Amino acid sequence: MNKKIIIPIAVVLVIALGLIWFFNQRRSDLTDELRRNLEGETSGVLANSDHIKEIRQFYAGRDYLETWLFNDALSNSGKQLLAQIEDSKYDGLQPGDYNLSRIYKLSSNPEKEDKKFRNLSSDQKVTLELLLTDSFFMLAHDLEKGKVNPSTLDSSWKFEEKETDVDYASLLEEVANGASVGKTFANLYPSSELYAQGRDAIRELYEILENDTLTWDLESVEGAIEVGEKHAAIPALRKRLIFWGFLKTYEPEDPNLFDSTMIEGLRKYQEANGMNPDGVIGSLVAESLNKSPQNLIDIASVNMERLRWMPKIDWDQEMVLVNIANYQLDYMDKSDTVFSAKVIVGKEYNESPTFTAPMSYIVFSPYWNIPPSITTSEIIPAIRKNKGYLAEKNMEVVTNAGEPVNAKNVDWSKNGDDFPYRVRQKPGGDNSLGLVKFMFPNEYNIYIHDTPARGLFDRESRALSHGCIRIQNPDQFAKILLNDKSWDEEKIQEAMHQDKEKVVELDRKIPVVLIYMTFWADKSGKANFRSDVYERDQALLEALRTTKSSLDQT
């Protein structure tokens, strides 16, 4: 026979024999056991699974061939999935929510870190196979949509519900056909770079946690401690500055003295954590330094969940991003920060909500149309005490159609729904909205505006408004948004100092995104933490750390 014919035939035979060997090895002869477990009236291993229907369909469609086992041990896919479950802590999730303890109990060396699964009985193999499949569905859901349903937890979360067309069963089919488990899960992550950067930061915090030998009992500080003063909290706070690398280890002459060496480390710490680097230990500094590595992991976990809640957003587009917890506005274009400004946000009892809406126009020299709630609670009581209040505040009374009304003819004994007028403040330097406002119409009546009280931007904590966002340097912001050479600084200033308001439509709609992030990691990998001014983190943390089955999930 011709050599050219013999060689291809031999190759085909070798491949055929190899495939026969592979599929004989691939099967652990669990077909009958899997079928019995999944077709029975009770669900056996998956008695408490929310995904029993999909799992039954998945195995029925592949003739009950296992996915996570190979040659009586974990397959490569099985090892990858187990690693993903273990690493879900870097997503701020709890590996224990994904059957990890039950899976570990099946290990042939449960006491060791590197778990092996050998010499298992048929029942154990079936249990392991089905637990891993159930874990796949649960983890895929939580990575894509979040573990907690925001609508049941956070009333300030006003984003539209995240829409998804992901079919977790189809993803599982792809993995069963050889797709990488790691890449499959990575494709479920939020598209924002903040998420990937956050995972890396949490991983680093876990590494730091392993070397943590400090005690993190609360060291409270009332008032302020300045350099040269003594305080019982100083020794602990000094150790924490050393722990985080802002101070080198040294022996102080007096452990309780806030000395000149410590102040340099403190200033570096303040600057790195978004505080005024004034070298004074106040309650905010003490609160921040009191946070242990585990506390920071918890804060980061909460914010990773918020990122998973977010609807799909094109982060490369032109957009205005306001982080309420950071008191900062960033104008972004192609993921680059073009302009940043300090902002003032709502007081704790007038919390600024989180949502997105398109900015469409700017109002120069605006009227302040005072909301009825403020008219009722503040303006009318002030007028009753002082008849000259309206003139002093440059305010006027108007009908609902905007026609001025003589204030002397108004019955100020009426209030609330009985009051038939509106009160507005005229344009001018004392107007509460300042000289310009930026409008992104929304049902919450939130907008961005100037303020006459510009000294407030020097404060470290800036939760001071009725809910709207006050911006520093509004003229610069207007120039960037208008993006028109004809709108130079002189023309903008002229528009800001008129007796009547001037509305200027933008030539495009710019998304405004208001978020509340007390943690994020930047492109350099640096973790940033901010004070939880609205105290929203704790409730979400408790929900994240609660056993999964008791949560109201989407």
Image (cartoon, rainbow, N blue to C red):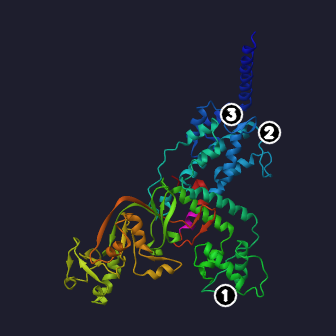
- Whether the magenta-drawn stretch holds residue 172 is answered as no
x, y percentage for residue 39?
60, 34
Depth check, front residue: 199 or 287? 199
Quarter holding the N terminus is top right
Secondary element type, mark 1? loop
Magenta: main secondary structure equals helix
Q: Check the image and report above or below for 453 versus 305.
A: below
Secondary element type, mark 2? loop
Q: Nearer the viewer, mark 2 or mark 3?
A: 2
Label 2: few (<14), some (14–19) or many (≥20) C-alpha neighbours in 10 Å? few
Q: Residue at x 62, y 76 (%)?
A: 270
Q: Is residue 531 visible?
A: yes
Residue holding disc 3: 33
Depth check, front residue: 522 or 230? 522
Label 1: few (<14), some (14–19) or many (≥20) C-alpha neighbours in 10 Å? some
Depth check, front residue: 26 or 493? 493
Q: Is residue 467 visible?
A: no
x, y percentage for residue 445?
36, 67
Residue holding disc 2: 119
